[in-house]
Image (tube, helix red, strand yellow):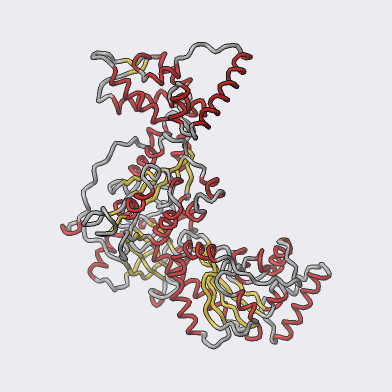
C-alpha cells in the first residue's frame, strides 16, 4: 500500500492495523494491503508470534557452502549487478541482498550500520529470511507470491523487524523457474519510493544475464518495437538454433509477442516472424551491427539484431556440417511402443520433450532396457547426428570415474596419458550424455557434475581451463533416488537438476509385448537368419518372471541361436541355457499346504545362507546349489 504524506501517519495507520489483527483478531482491510494481510496469516500459521523476538541465526557453514555450490551460476552472474547498484546507492544506509529460492541469503553488500549488531547478523550470508522463519518480509513474501513488492516498517510481521523498509523482486531462470530474490533493505525512516523500481531493474538485469549464459552457444535475437530499446534492458530476446527452432525467450520477448511461456514448445522462427531466418542470417553476416526490421505475426513490426557467432553459409567449405557419425543400432521409438500400453504412454510423453534440452531420468530394474530407450530418444531427437556418449557409473571404479567423466590434462596423475584425455562430458559436446546407474555416483563427484550442469562448462583434472559444452543429458538408475536423497546418499539439488521428466520403465514381467520383443531381439542376434520360437517355449517365457529383464532375454536368445544345428530354425527347450531351462521347466507344484510349508523353509534357508555369505549373491547361490539367476528370482 502506498505511503501517506508523512511517515508518522503511516506508522500510526500500521499501529492501528497491528492492534486490530494481532490483539483483537479482526481484519484491518482498509489499513493494510491484501498481500500483507495474506502474509500475516501465513506467518501466524507457521507458529510465529509478532511480539516474541526471534533471534537471528545463521545456518551451519556446510549448508551455506552447499547453497553456494547449488547457486554458483546465479551468484557469479548477479555479483556484477550487485556491485553496480551498490555504487549507485552508496551512503544511502541500504544493504543489497541476493537470496536463493529458499530465502537463504547468499550475498549481501552495503551499509548496515542503521541496524543493531544482532540485526546486522540477520542480513548476512547464511541467514534464512523465508516467511516461515522471519514472518512477513520482502524476501520471504516475494518467494511466497512470485511478485515484486515492498514491505515497509510495521508491515513486517515480527515487531523487531519494523525498523526496516525492504523492496524485493523475484528472479526467474530462462525456464520460468523461481531461483531467488534481489532485495534492497534500509532504514524505515529513509524510505524512498523509487527503491522498488530499482530492485525490479536489477532483477531484470540478472535474469537477462542468466538467459544469455544459458543460451551462450546459440543465436540470440534481440528486438523491440521501439528502435531505441534494442540493446538496453527491456529488449525482447529469443534464443534460436540455426535450423530455426526457438529454444527460449525472456519475459520481455514473451510480452512483446503476446505469448505464454508454455506456448514456446515446438515453435519455430517462421511461426513468429514473416521473414525467413536464412535471409536474416545473410543480412547479419554482411552488416553484423545493423538493426533489421522484422514483421512479427499479428502485424507488429520490430527492430532486431542478431548476437552470437553466426553460422557460416552452407556453401562455405571451412564450416561445413560434419558428416553424420556412425550409429550403433537402436530400435526406434515406434518399435519400443508397439504392443504394450505402458511403453506406448511412456514414449508419447518422451516424444514431447525431444525438441527441448530438458533432462530425462529413466528409472527401472537392471536390464529393463534403460540404455536402449536412451539411445532411441537420442536417435529420434535433433542431436541424432552428434555423439551419443554413455557412462555406467556403477561399472567403473570410484578412483577412475572422475577422470573418465571430466577428462584430464597432461601429467595430471601417475599413469595419465602424456597428451591428456577428453572426458565423456567433453566427448558428448553437441550430442547426448547418458549416465547409467547415476545413483551409484560418489557424492563428491555429484557436486562436480552439478556444477557442470549449472555452468555448462567442464574443467579437466589437473588444469585451470574450462571448456564450454552443449549437451542433452539422460540419466538412468535402478535405485529409488527419492529414497537415496532422504538417506543422504544422493544430492537433492542434483536430483532436481537431472529429473526434468522421470520415465518409469516397466519390468519385462509387467509388459504385454513379449512376442514382439522376442521377434525383435531374434532379428538382432540371428545374423539375418529366419529364426522362430516354439509355442511351448513362448508360453514358458510368458509365465517366467525374468529377474534379469530384457538383458536376460537377449542373452538367452543369443545362446539359443548359437546352439541351433545347421538347418534348424525353431528354438525349443533344448536350445535354452541350462539355468534358464532349470527355472522355467519345473514339475507341477505340490498341494497348497505343503507348498506354504516348503516355501517358508526355503525362505529361511535362503536368508540364512545369504547372511552367511555377507550378501554376496554369487557365493550364496553356490552354497545353495542353484544358479545365481534362480536365486535372484527367489529373492524377488
Evaluate whether residue 348 shows in this view: yes
* Residue sitting nearer the eye, 539 or 176: 539
Number of marks in picture: 0
Q: Is residue 372 above or below residue 182?
A: above
The answer to whether residue 477 is above or below residue 238 is: above
| Left or right of residue 570, residue 128 in this image | right
Residue 214 located left or right of residue 160? left
The answer to whether residue 275 is visible is no
| Picture coordinates of residue 302, whole percent (x, y) | 39, 69
Q: Residue at x 51, y 49 (%)?
A: 489
**Where does residue 636 sit, x and y in percent of width and height?**
52, 29
- Residue that sits furthest to the front in the current view: 612
Residue furthest left in the image: 317
Nearest the viewer among 579 and 183 is 579
Image position, residue 37 (x, y; %): 72, 68
Residue at 56 percent of width and 77 percent of height: 184
Q: Is residue 570 left or right of residue 591?
A: left
Amino acid at each position: 500500500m502506498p505511503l501517506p504524506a508523512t511517515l508518522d501517519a503511516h506508522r500510526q495507520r500500521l499501529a492501528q492495523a497491528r492492534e486490530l489483527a494481532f490483539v483483537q483478531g479482526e481484519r484491518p482491510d482498509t489499513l493494510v494491503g491484501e498481500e500483507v494481510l495474506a502474509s500475516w496469516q501465513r506467518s501466524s500459521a507457521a507458529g510465529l508470534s509478532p511480539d516474541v523476538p526471534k533471534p537471528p541465526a545463521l545456518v551451519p557453514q556446510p549448508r551455506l557452502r552447499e547453497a553456494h555450490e547449488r547457486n554458483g551460476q546465479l551468484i557469479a552472474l548477479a555479483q556484477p549487478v550487485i556491485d553496480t547498484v551498490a555504487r549507485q546507492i552508496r551512503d544511502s544506509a541500504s544493504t543489497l541482498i541476493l537470496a536463493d529460492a529458499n530465502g537463504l541469503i547468499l550475498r549481501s553488500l552495503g551499509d548496515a550500520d542503521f541496524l543493531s549488531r544482532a540485526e546486522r547478523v540477520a542480513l548476512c550470508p547464511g541467514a534464512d529470511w523465508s516467511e516461515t522463519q522471519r514472518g512477513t518480509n520482502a524476501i520471504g513474501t516475494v518467494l511466497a507470491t512470485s511478485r515484486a513488492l515492498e514491505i515497509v516498517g510495521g508491515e513486517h510481521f515480527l515487531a523487531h523487524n519494523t525498523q526496516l523498509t525492504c523492496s524485493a523482486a523475484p528472479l526467474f531462470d530462462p525456464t520460468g523457474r523461481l531461483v531467488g530474490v534481489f532485495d534492497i533493505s534500509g532504514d524505515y525512516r529513509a524510505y524512498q519510493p523509487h527503491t522498488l523500481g530499482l530492485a525490479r531493474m536489477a532483477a531484470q538485469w540478472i535474469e537477462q544475464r542468466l538467459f544469455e549464459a544459458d543460451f551462450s552457444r546459440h543465436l540470440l535475437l534481440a528486438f523491440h518495437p521501439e528502435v531505441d530499446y534494442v540493446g538496453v534492458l527491456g529488449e525482447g530476446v529469443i534464443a534460436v538454433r540455426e535450423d530455426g527452432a526457438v529454444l527460449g525467450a525472456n519475459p520481455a520477448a514473451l510480452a512483446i509477442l503476446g505469448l505464454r511461456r508454455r506456448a514456446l514448445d515446438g515453435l519455430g522462427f517462421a511461426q513468429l516472424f514473416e521473414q525467413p531466418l536464412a535471409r536474416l542470417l545473410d543480412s547479419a553476416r554482411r552488416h553484423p551491427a545493423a538493426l533489421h526490421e522484422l514483421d512479427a505475426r499479428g502485424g507488429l513490426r520490430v527492430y532486431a539484431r542478431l548476437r552470437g557467432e553466426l553460422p557460416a553459409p552452407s556453401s562455405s567449405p571451412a564450416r561445413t556440417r560434419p558428416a553424420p557419425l556412425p550409429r550403433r543400432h537402436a530400435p526406434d521409438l515406434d518399435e519400443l511402443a508397439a504392443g504394450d500400453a505402458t511403453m506406448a504412454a511412456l514414449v508419447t510423453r518422451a516424444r514431447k520433450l525431444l525438441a527441448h534440452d530438458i533432462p530425462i531420468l529413466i528409472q527401472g530394474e537392471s536390464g529393463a532396457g534403460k540404455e536402449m530407450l536412451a539411445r532411441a530418444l537420442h536417435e529420434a531427437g535433433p542431436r541424432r547426428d552428434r555423439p551419443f556418449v554413455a557412462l555406467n557409473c556403477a561399472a567403473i571404479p570410484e578412483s577412475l570415474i572422475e577422470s573418465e567423466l571430466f577428462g584430464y590434462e597432461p601429467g595430471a596423475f601417475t599413469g595419465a596419458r602424456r597428451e591428456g584425455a577428453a572426458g565423456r562430458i567433453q566427448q558428448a559436446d553437441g550430442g547426448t550424455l547418458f549416465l547409467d546407474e547415476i545413483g551409484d555416483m560418489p557424492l563428491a563427484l555429484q557436486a562436480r557434475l552439478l556444477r557442470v550442469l549449472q555452468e555448462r562448462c567442464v574443467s579437466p583434472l589437473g588444469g585451470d581451463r574450462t571448456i564450454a559444452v552443449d549437451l542433452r543429458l539422460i540419466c538412468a538408475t535402478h535405485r529409488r533416488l527419492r529414497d537415496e536423497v532422504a538417506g543422504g546418499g544422493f544430492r537433492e539439488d542434483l536430483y532436481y537438476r537431472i529429473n526434468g521428466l522421470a520415465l518409469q520403465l516397466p519390468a519385462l514381467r509387467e509388459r504385454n509385448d513379449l512376442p514382439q520383443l522376442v521377434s525383435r531381439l531374434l532379428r538382432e542376434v540371428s545374423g539375418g537368419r529366419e529364426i522362430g520360437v516354439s509355442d511351448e517355449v513362448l508360453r514358458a517365457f510368458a509365465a517366467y518372471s525374468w529377474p534379469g529383464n530384457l538383458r536376460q532375454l537377449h542373452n538367452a536368445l543369443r545362446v539359443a541361436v548359437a546352439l541351433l544345428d545347421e538347418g534348424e530354425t525353431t528354438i525349443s527347450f533344448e536350445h535354452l541355457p541350462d539355468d534358464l531351462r532349470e527355472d522355467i521347466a519345473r514339475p507341477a507344484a505340490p498341494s497348497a499346504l505343503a507348498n506354504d510349508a516348503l516355501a517358508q523353509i526355503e525362505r529361511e534357508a535362503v536368508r540364512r545362507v545369504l547372511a552367511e555369505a555377507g550378501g554376496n549373491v554369487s557365493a550364496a547361490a553356490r552354497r545353495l546349489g542353484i544358479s545365481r539367476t534362480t536365486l535372484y528370482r527367489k529373492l524377488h
